[in-house]
Image (tube, coloured by chain):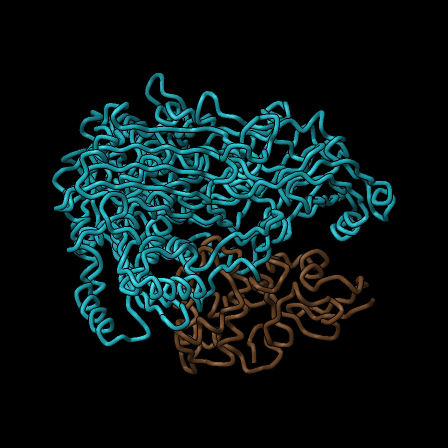
Chain colours: A cyan, B brown
Amino acid sequence: MTATAEPEIGRARLRKEDARLITGDTRWTDNIQMAGMLHMAVLRSPMAHAKITGIDVTAAAAMPGVLLVLTGEDVAAEQGSLPCAWPITEDMLAPPAPSLAVDEVNFAGEGVAVVIARSDYEAHDALAAIDVEYDELPVVLDMEAAVADGADLVHPDLGTNKSATWVFDSAEAGTGADVDQAIADAEVTVTRTFRQQRLIPAFMEPRSVVVDPGGGSITMWSATQVPHILRWMLAAVLGIPEHKVRVIAPDVGGGFGGKLQVTPEEVLTLLVARRLGKPVKWTESRTESMLSAHHGRDQIQQLTVTARRDGTVTGLKVDLLADMGAYLRLVTPGVPILGAFMFNAIYKFPAYRFTCVNVFTNKVPTDAYRGAGRPEATFAIERLMDELAVELGMEPMELRRKNWIKHEEFPFTTVCGLTYDSGNYEAATDRAMELFGYDELRQEQARRRESGDPVQLGIGISTFTEMCGLAPSRVLGSLRYGAGGWEHAAIRMLPTGKVELITGTSPHGQGHETAWSQIVADRLGVPFEDVEVLHGDTQSSHKGMDSYGSRSLAVGGTAIVLAADKVLAKARTLAAHLMECSESDVEFASGQFSVRGTGTSTALGDVVLAAHVAHNLPDGMEPGMDAECTFDPTNFSFPHGTHLCATEVDTETGAVKIRSYVCVDDIGEVVNPLIVEGQVHGGLAQGIAQALFEEAVHDESGTLTTATLADYLLPSAADLPHFTTDRTVTPADSNPLGVKGVGEAGTIASTPAVVNAVIDAVRHLGVDDVEMPCTPMRVWKAVHQGKERGVPTTPVAAGGLGSIDAQGGAE
Amino acid sequence: MRITVSVDGVSYTDEVEPRMLLVHYLRERLGKTGTVVGCDTSNCGACTVHLDGHSVKSCSMFAVQADRHEVTTIEGLARDGQLHPVQKAFHENHALQCGFCTPGMIMQSIDLLADDPDPSEETVRHGLEGNLCRCTGYQNIVKAVRDAAHQMRPGAGPEAEQVAPSPSHAGGGE
C-alpha cells in the first residue's frame, strides 16, 4: 500500500547520507578524540608458525610516553577465546583462539604484544623496542598437502589439519537421487578442478576501535558491520555483563563481510582501557589490515557433472577443500556451507552431493567476504556449464536454457530442498542478450578467429542465482549456526508528527538512512524528510542482527513495513474513535484518515498528537503511537540474473580487456533504483577484480607478500569498463515488499562471466582453463602451452572423465 | 619545528615533530577529520588535499613541507553554504556509497578539471587512477566528474557555484 501522493517506493531518491560524506562532516571511529585518550599499537609476528620462547619488553616499557606493554601471557587469564558462532558439525575441531598469542603463533600477522602510549607515534616507536624470540615450526600452507597423511600440523594438539567434514547428499536427504548412480549411468561426464584464490576484503576505511571505560559501563566505538553481535560476543568472551557494554558503529567505511567479525583488537582495546581506566584508541595501518583482518574465498573445488548426450544434466558432485586459515573466526567454518545449496544454481539437477573438508593452514583466518560461499559456488557451476557445453558441442546459452527452471515451474523445490519462490530466467536472459548484441558478437568472434587476429574476442556467460535475505532462524538453527536471522524495527511517532525509525540493520555504505526513510514515508504518508533513521548504537537500537548477506532490506525492511502497519492499525482505531465512526468505515490514504462516503477526515499527525496527549483515548488504549516489530523470514530470497561479458584477449601479451559488460538482474521489487544500480556497479567491480586482478599471495615461509595496496591490486577507474545494467522484476513471495536483496549479486555473478569470456577467447588455441586472477602472464602461458599441446580442448579424449567425442569440442 | 600553514583559509602556527605527516597534523592538531587515511603507501588517495591549489596525498608529505603554504581540504570547499559543483555532482550522480574515499576523490576531481575542463570518460578514468574506491565501481564517479565539468562551464549555472578565478580560492585547482 502506498500512502503518499507520489509513491516513495521505487523512487530514485538522492541519498540523505551524502550531505555529511561530501563535506567531510563525518564520524569515523578514528576521528574520535577524548580527554586523556591513549593509543594502542600491536606488535605482530613475522613468523607464520613458531613457538614464542621469550619476550623482553623492558626497553619498550621505559620509552617516553609509554604507559603499558602487555604480552599474551599478561592477558591470558582474561582474554578468553575469540568466538566461532558456527560449529558446522558436532565433531568440528576448533583450537583456542587467543586475541594475543600466548606461547605459539600460527600466522604471520598474529598479535604477540601491545603497547599503550600517550600518542600513536610513541606507541609505534616502542613496538620496535620489543624483543621476541621465536622457535620456528614447520609452516603449513598448501591445503592438499595439509590433508595428506603425515602432514605437518598447524595445531598438533588436534592431531589433524581437518577441522570438519560437512556433507549434503540429495539421496540421503530425500530431496533427489543418488549421484553415484548418476555417474555410473552417465552418457557424458566432465570433471574439473577450480581454484578460488584467497582474497582480501580491502574495505577503504581501516578498522578502528575506541573504548571508553568510564562512567560505570563500557562504551566501544568500532568500525564494524555488527554492533549487536559484537556486544553479545564481548559479553560472552570476556564475561562482562552485557548490560554494562554499549557498542556504537558510527560512520563505517565499507565492510563487504570484512567487518563481520569480533576482532582480537576489539577485545584487546577493551581489556587495556579497562585496566588503565582511560579511553584507548586503536587504528590499524593498511598493512596491518591486510595481515590480520580476515581474508576471503580460498577453496579448491573439484566438480563432476553428468549429462545425457542431448544436454540434459543428470547429476552433480562437488568436493571442496576450504582454507580456514589458522583459527576459526566468527563464521569461518560456515562460509563454504553457505555455498553448499548453490552449486546446483538455476538448473534442474536430479542428483547432487556436496562434500566440504575445512582445513587449517598457517595463514590469516578466512571468513565472510562479499557473497560468502555463493560466489565460489556460482563460479564453479558456471565455469563447468561452459566446459560441459564444449564437451557436448552445444552453444553454452542453449545448454543453460535446456536445464534451467522455466518461469512457469516456480515455486520450484531444488535438489537441495530449497524452494525458489519466483524468477524468470528466460526474461532476464533475453533482455541481456539483446542489450549485449550476443549474435553480432558471436559473428565477430568467428571472423576474428578465422582471420587469426592476434587479439581474440571471447564471450562469457553467467546465469546465476543466489540465496540471500539471511535468514530464517529455524534454518540457521538446523545448520548449527549460533544465532537467529530475524531483524527488528521500531517506529517512534513524535508529537510534532516527525518520525524516528530505529533499525537493527547496521549500514556501512548501503544507504539505509535513505531507503528506510522511503519505506516509512511510503507506508505512513509522511514526508521523506520527516523520517530520521537511528542505527548502529546498541543503546538506541537495542535489538538487531546487523547487516550482511544481502539481508537488510528483505529482512530489516520487512520489519519496518510491519512496524508501520502496527502504527497504522492503532492510529485507525483512534481515528475512528475521534471521528466517531466505525473502524471499518475508516480509510487511509496520503497520510489522511477519512470516513468512507463522507467529507470527514483527520490527518495521521493529528491522531498521533491525540495519542500523545492522551486526553481522549478509547478505554484501554495506551498513550502514544509507537510500535515495533521483529520479523523472522520463512524463506530465503533468490535474486537471479544473466551477466554477459565480452573480452578482448591479446594472444601475444596475454592482456585482457573487457570490451563490454551487460547484466540484467532480477532482484524483485526495488525501493530505490539509484542505490540498487550503485550496488550492482560496486559488486561487479569486486567480482571482476577476483577474475582479473586480486590475489593474496604468500611466500614459502608464509609471509603475505601482497600486504600493501601497491602489491594487492584493487582495480582503479582505469582498470574497469563501463557497465550496462538493466533489471527484470519478478517479486519475491517471501516478504510484503517483494524484494530480494542486491548487495552481493554483482560480485556473485560477474567472476565466472569474465573468466568464461577469457577462456572463450582462446579456447580454439587449446586453452580450457586459466587460474584466477587471469593475469597477462597466466593467460599468455595458457595460450602458449595450449598451442604446444595442440589439442582442441581437454588432454584426455578417450571416453570417461573429461572426455570429448568426435563431434564435440570447440568449434 | 615551527610551521605556519594556512588551512581552509585560516592561518595556524604550530610546533610539530619533523616526522609528523601532514594528514596527522590536519586530523589530530587541527581537527580536520574530513581528510582520512586509507593506505599509508599513497595508492588509495583517500587523504588527498590541495597544496597551493594542486592535489597532493597528505599521508605522503610531512607537515613541515606545508610550512608557508596554503592547504585546502574537503572541509574548505563549500562557500557561503554553497557546495562546490563537484561536491554537488557527487551527490546528484550517486558517486559515493560508504563515502570514505569521497573527500580524496572530490579533491582529485577538482584538480583534474582544472587541467582539463571538459575531460572524456577515458581522461577521467586515468585522472583518478591514484584514488581507489571499493564501493561504486567508479561508473557514477566518472559520471559525476563529467557532470561537474558541464556545470562549471562558463555561463553554466548560478555564479555562486562557479569556480572563482582567484588563485587563493579554496579548491579551484588553478
B16 up-or-down from A30: above or below: below
Seen at 66% across and 66% down, the residue is B60
B33 up-or-down from A802: above or below: below
Is A515 on the left-hand or right-hand side of A420? right
Name the image quarter holding residue A58. Answer: top right
Quadrant containing the N terminus of chain A is: top left
Name the image quarter holding residue A334. Answer: top left
In the depicted view, which residue is nearer to us: A757 or B143? A757
Seen at 60% across and 44% down, the residue is A292
Whether residue A789 is visible to the viewer of this picture, yes or no, is yes
Quadrant containing the C terminus of chain A is: bottom left
Seen at 57% across and 42% down, the residue is A364
Is A645 on the left-hand or right-hand side of A286? left
Whether residue A6 is visible to the viewer of this picture, yes or no, is no
Picture coordinates of residue A241 (x, y %)? 62, 22
In the depicted view, which residue is nearer to us: B121 or A669? B121
Picture coordinates of residue A713 (x, y %)? 51, 60
Picture coordinates of residue A48 (x, y %)? 64, 43
Picture coordinates of residue B31 (x, y %)? 67, 56
A233 up-or-down from A505: above or below: above
Is A788 on the left-hand or right-hand side of A93? left
In the depicted view, which residue is nearer to us: A696 or B1? A696
Is A673 on the left-hand or right-hand side of A111? left
